[in-house]
Image: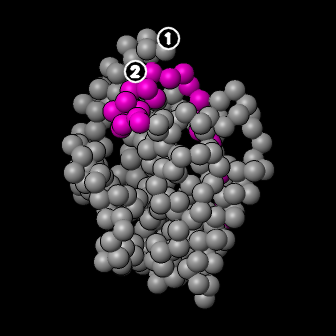
Amino acid sequence: MSGWRLFYRVPWLLAHLLIGLPLTLLTFLPPFNRPPASGRSVNEVVQAWWAAMVCRIFGLRRKVSGSFEPGPHLVAANHISWLDIQLLHSLSTMGFVAKAEIERWPLAGWLARIGETVFHQRGNHDSSRGVVVTMAERLKNGRKVAIFAEGGILPGPGIKRFHARLFAAALESNAWVQPVMVRYVRAGAADEEVTFLPGEGFLGNFFRLLARSPCTAEVWILPRFRPGDLPRREIALRAQKAVEQAWASAPLP
């Protein structure tokens, strides 16, 4: 019933890739990527435009509470859909930590590398340590790094346990920790079909979401905090509780 949306969204997406992508990549070159004395660089503005347009093409109506402060932050969010990345990118430039398999994906892997994604081999202790070191270096250099602290897109509604290991980067750099709650809403309830359905692969999910009617994509940017001398498990738990509280108390439209 909703497949007719593909007739205009597919051409819209192709135009965005063929025209918008080269323009966006151009801004990664000097002088467009140089930070101004105040505000955002041309590159940061164009990256936000690119991501916001992807959200529009997929029918996401963004609703944002709060704002990202400038400077280094470890952004810790829950994870529902691969669209979460575009949603957060549309609000502020940040590098994400992603599973290593994405680096091998056609086009998406290349774009992820350009966007300063840090690739992590799950279950590999050496990889985890290398990821933490890279994250800490970027935070010390004044950039934002984002993690989906649940460790991936997990089945079931609500907020899952935040894993503590990658929060070590905030300890080593003394950067702000910025909890963020992401939620998709349709017809006055949490939209549970934005995520992967059982047995659904990426392409199936991609085209199913592209064909769906619009929904509201909420981003709650919650009060940030310094890690101080807290153990990383306590830092993760504090961020998790902030996101859980927002999920439970945020009014549904």
In front of the other: label 2 or label 1? 1
- Left or right for 55, reference 31: right
Which kind of residue does numbered mark 1 sit on? Met
How far from the left and from the top, in percent, is residue 3?
43, 14
Query: Circle 2: is it few (<14), some (14-19), or many (20+) Cα within 10 Å?
Result: some
Residue displayed at 63% across by 78% down: 234
Does the segment drawn in magenta span residue 185? no
How far from the left and from the top, in percent, is residue 58?
46, 29
Q: Which mark is residue 9?
A: 2
Q: Is residue 33 visible?
A: no
Q: Is residue 153 visible?
A: yes
Q: What are the residue bounds of the magenta stretch?
A: 199-223
Residue for badge 1: 1
> Helix or strand or loop: what does disc 1 sit on?
loop
Q: Farthest residue in the front direction? A: 199
Nearest to N terminus: mark 2 or mark 1: 1
> Helix or strand or loop: what does disc 2 sit on?
helix
